[in-house]
Amino acid sequence: MLLSLILASCSSQETTQNQSTDDTGNDQVVITESGTGGTGTGSTDSSSGGGTEQPVTDTSGPHYGGKITLAALADVQFFDPMDWVGGGITLDLTNQRLWDGDWSKGPAGGYGEGLTDWGTSEDVRSNKMGYLAEKISFEVDNENNVGHLIYDIRPGVNWFVNPDNPASVLVGGRDVTADDVVYSLKRTITDPQANIYRSNPFLREAVIEKTGPMQVTVTVPIERLLEAGKRFGDSTFPVAPEVIEKYGSMREWENNVGTGPYMIKDYVSGSAATLEKNPNYWMTDPVGPGKGNQLPYIDEVKWLIIPDNSTRQAGLRSGKIDRLSDVTYEDSKMLDSTTKGLEKKALARLSVKPIYMRTDKAPFDNLQVRRAMMMATDFKTIEEGLYDGTGGILTWPYDYTKAYAGLYLSLDDADCPDSVKELYQYNPDKAKQLLAEAGYPDGFKTDLVLISSEVDYYSIVKDQWSKAGINLNLDVVESGVETNMQIARSHEALITAATGPPSIWPMFSVLTGEGWQNASIINDPTINAATAEIGKMAITDEPGAMAKTRELMKYVLAQAYVIPAASYPSYTYWWPWIKNYSGERSIGYFWVESWPQYCWIDDSLKASMQ
C-alpha cells in the first residue's frame, strides 16, 4: 500500500477522505483538507462509568468501540523486542515489560495523582508498577558485592490469541511463565544481534535463573544493579520461546505475539500499521470514572507513517489525525492561530545538542577557559530571541522535569552558588579577562563538529564568542559521521552530542567513565567519588540520592565541562473527542505511546466538530 497524503486548503466547509486503489491493487489513502478543523470548546468533562464491557448510550462516560488515528515520523523498525531497548509504536501496545510506569501516578484524565506528567522517559520507582511481574525487589549483598533483581511473575496473564496469526495460534493463548521470562532475559545477553548484548556487554555475565514456580532472579555486581533493572525490567519484553524456536525471530510483523492491549492486524512498510483490540487483555482501568473496567476501550489504533512535518500538521488540523506530539514552539504558534478546538499541553523541553569538549586537551583542560566560554555565551538572549522566553538555559546535565525536580538545581534557588550563576550571565569582558589569565590574551581558534540542523543556532554562538576573542569554525558533518565520532571519541576539540534523558541519572554516564556519552572526557576525582556513592544510595533511597545529586550539581556546574543549549517546550495536541487523555506520552521508562489503552473516543463529539 502506498500512503499518499495530499493536503490542500480551500474554501469548502467539508473534509473528506477517499479510499482508492492504484494500478498495483494496493489501497491508497488520500486526505483532502478543507477548512481548519473543528470549532468545539474542547471540553473534556466525563461522568462516572464502570463495570465490564457492554454497550452504552451515555457517550460522556467511558465506553468501548471506535478507532484512533495517529502519526509517526518514521517507519516501524522493530517487531522483535530483542532488537531495541526503547520499544516502538507497535511494540509498546502489543508487548509488555516486566514493570514500567503506573498510569494513575500521572494526570490520568484529571483523576490521577499528578506526581508526573508522563511527558518524557522517566524511571522514578515510586511512579512505577509491575506488569508481567507483579512484584519487583532489589536486594544488595554487600559482603559478596552482588545485587539481586527478583521478579515475581504475575499469574494468569495470557499470550494473546489472534486466529489470523499462525505464531499466535502456535502459542495457543497459554499463560506467561517464569520459564518464558528466563528464556527472554537470557536471549538479550546471549544473542549477538540483541541490542542489549551489543550496547551493554557488562550484562552478558549476569546470572539469570528461575528461583520459584513464578519467580526469576537476576544477579549482577552491585554497581550494575540499577542498569540491570533498566535493561531487564524496563527494556525487555518477554517472548514465547516456541515462536522464536520455530520462526527464528519475531522480526516479521506476522510473527509478533505479546500480552499487550492490542494485536497487529496489518502493516505496510512506509505506509501504516493497524492494531486491533486484544479481547483477552488482562488489565483493568486503574483510576477514574472507568475504574475496574476491562481495558482497552478503543477497538483500533492506526499509525500513519508521515515523515513530512507539514503533512502531519495538516492531518491534525483536518481531524484525520486525532493527536500529534513533538510539536515545536514555532509550529505550535501556527497551530494556535489556525485551528480552533484543539487541546494542548507543553511537555518535555527540547534543544539542539549541547557542546562537549576535549577536557583532556588544551585549552579545554583549563577551568578558566571553560568558564570564559560560558560567559561569552548569551544564553538568555538566545532563549528569549528564539523561543520567546518559554524555555530554559540551565539544561545540562539535567533540564527541569517534574519527575526529577529533586535533583534539579535552579539558577533561582537561594542556595545556587554565585560561581554557577555568573556562568549564565553574558559577560564578554569578564570572558576576555579569564582567557588572558589562562594564557590566551588574544583568544584562540577552535572547531565545532555539528550537523546541518544546528548551524543556525550555533552561528549565533559563533558571533557571540567572537566578541570575547574565541574564533569558532563550524565543521558541518552528516549525522551518522558525528555519532560515530562521539562513540569513538575522535573529535579534536568541540562536538555537539546527545545528553540522554534524566531517567538515566544514577548512571552518571555524561559525567564519568569511558562511555560515548561522556563526550567531554570528564575524569574528575570529586565527581567520580560522589557519583559512586550516590549510585549505590539510589538502589535503596532514590529521593535521598536525588537530593545528593542536586548538591553535587553546585560543584559540577561550576566546572563548565559542557556548554549547554537553551531549551524550548515541545507540545502535544489532540482533539477533545479523545477522552481520559491529558497529553501523556511515555508511561515510564521508554514506554512511549502506550497511553491509548486507557482512553476512549467520543464519536458524537467528533461528529459535531467536523
Image (tube, helix red, strand yellow):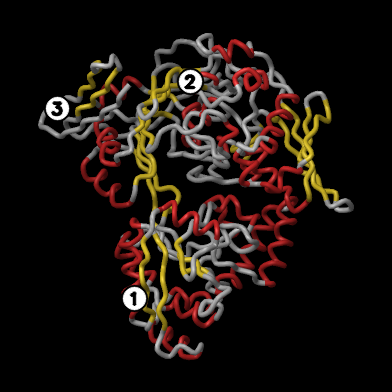
Q: Is residue 585 above or below residue 268?
A: below
The residue carrying mark 1 is 464
Secondary structure found at label 2: strand
Q: Position of residue 223 (x, y in %)?
A: 75, 53
Secondary structure found at label 1: helix
Query: CA separation, marks 2 and 1?
Result: 52 Å
Whether tag 1 and tag 3 are in contact, CB under 8 A, the answer is no
Q: Amino acid at mark 1?
A: Gln
Whether tag 2 and tag 1 are in contact, CB under 8 A, the answer is no
Q: Find residue 264 and name its label.
A: 2
Number of the front mark, 2 or 3: 2
The residue carrying mark 3 is 13
Q: Is residue 362 left or right of residue 478?
A: right
x 60%, y 68%: residue: 522
Q: Is residue 63 left or right of residue 225?
A: left
Q: Amino acid at mark 2?
A: Ile
Q: Amino acid at mark 3?
A: Gln
Q: Is residue 73 above or below residue 476?
A: above
The quadrant in which the N terminus is found is top left
Query: CA separation, marks 1 and 3?
Result: 50 Å
Q: Position of residue 37 (x, y in %)?
A: 23, 32
Q: Nearer the viewer, residue 373 or 485?
A: 485
x 71%, y 57%: residue: 535
Q: Nearer the viewer, residue 434 or 271?
A: 271
